[in-house]
Image (cartoon, rainbow, N blue to C red):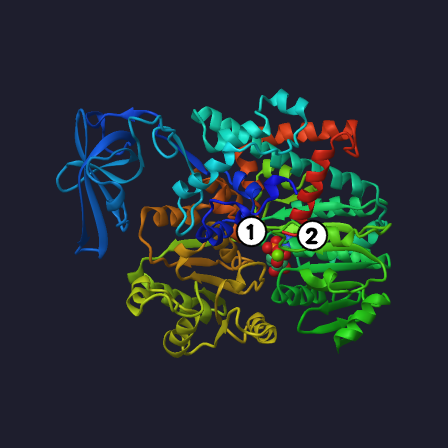
Amino acid sequence: MPPQNKHLSDIRGIQTRFLPKLKKLGIETIHDLLFFLPTRYEDFSKIYTIEDLIPNQEATITAEVVSIKSRNTWKRNLYLVEAELQDQTGTIRATWFNQPYIKNILVPGRRANFAGKIIESKKTGEIYLSNPTYELVSDHMRHETRHTGRIIPIYKETKGLTSKGIRFLIQPILKEQIDIPDIIPEAIRKSLGFPNIQEAIHIVHFPDTIEDALLAKRRFAFEDLFLLQLTTLRERMKIAMKKAHTVKEDIPFIKTLLKGLPFELTESQKKSLWEIIKDIERPFPMNRLIEGDVGSGKTVIAGISALLVAKSGLQTAFMAPTEILAQQHYRTLNKLFKNQDVSILLYTGSEAKIRYDAELESILTKQEARRLIENGTASIIIGTHALIQKGVNFKHLAFVIIDEQHRFGVEQRATLEREKEFAPHFLSMTATPIPRTLALTLFGDLDISLINELPKNRKQIITKAIPDNDREKAHEQIHTEIKKGRQAFVICPRIKPSETLSAREEQLLLIKTVTEEYEKLSKYIFKEFSVGMIHGKLSPKEKEQIMKLFAENKIQIIVATSVIEVGVDVPNATIMMIEGADRFGLAQLHQFRGRVGRAEHQSYCFLFSQGNSETTKKRMKAIVEAKNGFELAEYDLRLRGPGEFLGTSQTGMPDIAMKAIQNPDLIKEARALAQKILTANPTLSKYPLLKEKLIQFEKSIHFE
Ligand code: ADP
Ligand code: MG
């Protein structure tokens, strides 16, 4: 076993109490620890004298402890340690909270480096060091400092394991010679001016200058992007070698079909449809992404494409992220194709049914459904993303559609392309606005169709951030709308009051729970209307029942958690009221808002938030002003970087994607170099280390 794969528990000198904490950060081996890169750096390289310190600066001083004492603060029930520090130029106070052991270390007379932020007391105007990192120094020994007096790396921390702790663990390991293979071919590495891997690891954790540190970090970012580009390019090469079923274009049929739709397609819908028609006519697999804002009408394009495939006697798997959406698509296609002779089958965890043709629909057992898919009776098969992974066999699957694609289908494609001679055409759809660079990184192997306009009948949604005392006005407006025949959504952030919060905190936060809100609205505020409730704890059957009643306007108001977030299409709904709006990401809020404004009626989005901070205000302003997802994305990218808008937890966007948006030039470089190396040596046989790593990497993104 290479030494860097050694488990940390086998290393002497690492205390066992740290192991679970390290594990929490995803660190289990020496390799993990060495590749746990700092998120940022603080420059404590210059040692200041006390008289030179200025408020708000981050600084290191070398000083002697004059006195140290501790006390409980009456105000916040905190344990406070306070020390008086002195150097040749003056004295300063340092404070620490809840670290009583400091008194045993920093005894009077000890000399140490102290690094931290200089704070100016609002009351007295005096400056002090707040919660500084410290490190004892002695005059006799030349002491190599780890935590002060230099550039200090800051890591992602976890409870009980600080950046200081992490540095403490890494340093002894770095002292030993560890042989880590460098996967970047030397010629490429040198052409980019990057340090080799050994140097890079040293520098990134213990840099002499910020510039060195950033260059080392850039090397690691490049490494990931390079692997990603190699992966997508190889994927593209693999796909290009597969065959696909061809779907002959039939212009007269398409013309009549379009005439029979309840609306005229927008120009960009037509264009996207045309791009698909051209692609599926070819004998090798299409690999296309439709990107279009919420409500831009992606479903109908996917549906028509599937119908064309069915007309050629071939099958389509149409997958949605949730059962609610799969059911909705089933209803939508049934309506759109009510005069078409096409069989559509719904197959989800809780039910299966088939519509044979315009007249005949029947409920199926799972087994029957699988048989009808296997013998080719069913042409368009609608289900959740699990559809293709659940041992369902198709007679001749020619087309796969994935709706509301956040995970980008890498996994699904891998499943579909299992060793078969024929691969299906592949279409995915997303409302997540993806900047071009990012698209290139993540979908280097995809073609993109853009739907960049909304259907003509739409009115701009009126969005308002509502202060608490105007709540009743908002309720009145909802009354008026429902009286006119419209419907409303009310979104709440959580299902039940949390156990960890005290009743008082709960009240303070004013968390609206779905159940409470439902009671309140159905019994009092909107008691003359029919109100429904939907949340993740309901069974799929119950959810579908409620959505169906809502779609038929038998329920006027639906109170829901974020299960309603993506894709739901009830054009008669015109009000979206969001409680605790500050607790949702902007992309999510935009998705919610996209549930209304889906037809000609004027629609409204009301935002209620408890938070009143500047950030909350700014965010609410952004969502009120941004007219579409792209504007919002741009705003967020500019103001807060990619994390907030395309947050990993929300969209499944990998870390790599984050790095990518921040490094557009690096992506281009990585792509060009990946292309070059693959052209010269498609099997990568000359680069065994790189190849081995690439195989690991591909696995990790397929199964993430
Ligand atoms: P999304 O792109 O968010 O998935 P949908 O496909 O659900 O949007 O379409 C939103 C609504 O707009 C649906 O009710 C659909 O019937 C309607 N729609 C789609 N295209 C048009 C169009 N060209 N003109 C008018 N309405 C349309
Ligand atoms: Mg949709």
Seen from the viewer's position, the closer of residues 654 and 269 is 654
570 with respect to 416 (left or right)? left
Query: Label 2: few (<14), some or many (≥20) within 10 Å?
Result: some
Outermost residue, left side: 124
Locate residue 153, reporting x and y percent: 42, 35
Residue at numbered disc 1: 651
Q: Residue at x 59, y 46 (%)?
A: 453
Locate residue 485, reporting x and y percent: 50, 70
Locate residue 324, reporting x and y percent: 61, 67
Seen from the viewer's position, the closer of residues 301 and 286 is 286
- Sequence order check, earlier mark of 1 and 2: 2
Residue 291 lies, with reference to residue 471, above or below; the image says: above
Three-letter code, disc 2: Glu
Q: Which residue is drawn at 18% across and 55% down?
A: 75
Quadrant of the rendering where the N terminus is positioned: top right
189 with respect to 25 (left or right)? right
Mark toward the viewer: 1 or 2: 2
Q: Which residue is drawn at 51% across and 51% down?
A: 23
> In the picture, residue 355 is in which quadrant?
bottom right
Locate residue 559, reporting x and y percent: 47, 69
Q: Is mark 2 on a helix, strand or loop?
A: helix
> In the picture, residue 607 is in which quadrant?
bottom left
Whether residue 357 is visible here, answered yes or no, is no
Which quadrant of the picture is home to ligand 1?
bottom right
68 with respect to 591 (left or right)? left
Q: What element carries label 1?
A: helix
Residue at numbered disc 2: 411
